[in-house]
Image (cartoon, rainbow, N blue to C red):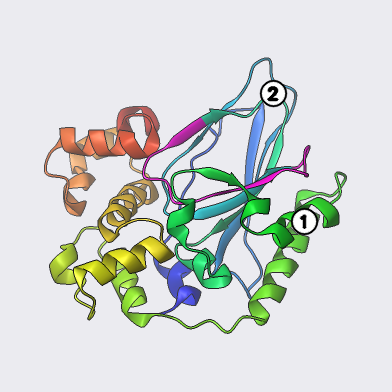
């Protein structure tokens, strides 16, 4: 397994905007085949009309790294690493954010940057990838459509990938595959026995994911619940959370709220 197969095993969901919200729209475009297993999607979050008050944007934990910028202010672009809990912040009354969601481990493999240095924070992209930040500022025009912007970014990343000679750590990738296969519910020390000592495992997950294997497993379990799309009633009756290691409802609710920001009952209304 290498990053070109991660998409087969993992679907990171961002339930950003309610389908009943008529003032804000959220869209995703799948990347070209050349990079589709490094990039999960290009995304757009925009206002349909100017809002009466600042919009509070909530990002749930998904194990990914995102590059993003406000198309109305393209001179400023940012990168957000792995987040161990949900993040929420006001983003104004009028905006059009464009983003790139990298699949877990893809960003460090592409750019050689330690994911741990990006974790639990948002940083200016120019400090991390100055050439990429310059591309967004100089090659994308304010009049460009989301589809046009996606094409520019896709071609930029495809070109970069073609010039890379990536060496994959198969011990790490086999561990990653097992985590996805088990939906994050496994014994770290016993099940992830891929010839790595606990210290090596911690170091390698910090570099490629931005956190420990245990912390990443917790996010994968959470994302498994989101992908199941349970209703409030079915969650209560089927108790899906038992299947991924939550020993009681209170434990599940506490964990879910950490990653989502609200309780399951509020999320799955």
**What x and y, as percent, mark residue 166?**
53, 81
* SS state under label 2: loop
Q: Which residue is the site of mark 1?
A: 134
Q: Earlier in the sequence, mark 2 or mark 1?
A: 2
Q: Quadrant of the N terminus?
A: bottom left
Quarter-of-image position of residue 38:
bottom right
Residue at image coords 22%, 47%: 240
**What x and y, as percent, mark residue 152?**
78, 62
Query: From this viewpoint, which residue is outermost toward the front?
Result: 127
Residue at image coords 22%, 81%: 195
Q: What are the residue bounds of the magenta stretch?
A: 71-88
Which of discs 2 and 1 lies nearer the camera? The answer is 1
Q: Is residue 138 visible?
A: yes
Real-space Cα separation, disc 2 to disc 1, in angstroms: 26 Å
Whether residue 94 sits left or right of residue 3 in the image: it is: right
Residue at image coords 36%, 45%: 84
Residue at image coords 73%, 27%: 94
The numbered disc on residue 17 is: none
Whether residue 24 sits left or right of residue 263 in the image: it is: right
* SS state under label 1: helix
**What x and y, as percent, mark residue 57?**
55, 32
Q: Residues within 10 Å of mark 2 (few under 14, many from 20)?
A: some
Q: Which residue is the site of mark 2?
A: 93
């Amino acid at each position: 397994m290498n990053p070109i197969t991660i998409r087969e095993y993992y679907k990171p969901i961002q339930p950003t905007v309610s389908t009943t919200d008529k003032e804000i729209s959220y869209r995703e475009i799948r990347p070209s085949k050349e990079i589709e297993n490094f990039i999960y999607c290009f995304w757009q979050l925009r206002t349909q009309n100017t809002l009466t008050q600042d919009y509070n944007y909530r990002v749930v934990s998904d194990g990914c790294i995102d590059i993003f910028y406000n198309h109305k202010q393209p001179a400023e672009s940012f990168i957000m690493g792995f987040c161990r809990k949900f993040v929420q912040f006001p983003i104004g009354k009028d905006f059009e954010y464009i983003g790139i969601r990298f699949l877990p481990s893809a960003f460090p493999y592409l750019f050689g940057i330690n994911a741990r240095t990006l974790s639990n924070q948002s940083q200016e992209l120019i400090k991390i990838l100055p050439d990429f930040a310059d591309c967004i500022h100089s090659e994308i025009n304010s009049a460009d459509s989301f589809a046009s912007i996606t094409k520019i970014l896709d071609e930029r990343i495809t070109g970069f990938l073609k010039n890379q000679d990536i060496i994959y750590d198969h011990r790490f990738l086999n561990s990653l595959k097992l985590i996805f296969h088990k939906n994050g519910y496994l014994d770290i020390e016993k099940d992830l026995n891929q010839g790595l000592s606990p210290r090596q495992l911690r170091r390698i997950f910090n570099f490629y994911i931005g956190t420990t294997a245990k912390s990443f497993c917790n996010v994968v379990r959470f994302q498994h619940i989101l992908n199941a799309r349970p209703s409030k009633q079915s969650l209560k009756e089927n108790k899906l959370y038992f299947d991924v290691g939550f020993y009681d409802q209170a434990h599940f609710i506490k964990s879910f709220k950490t990653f989502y920001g609200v309780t399951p009952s509020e999320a799955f209304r």
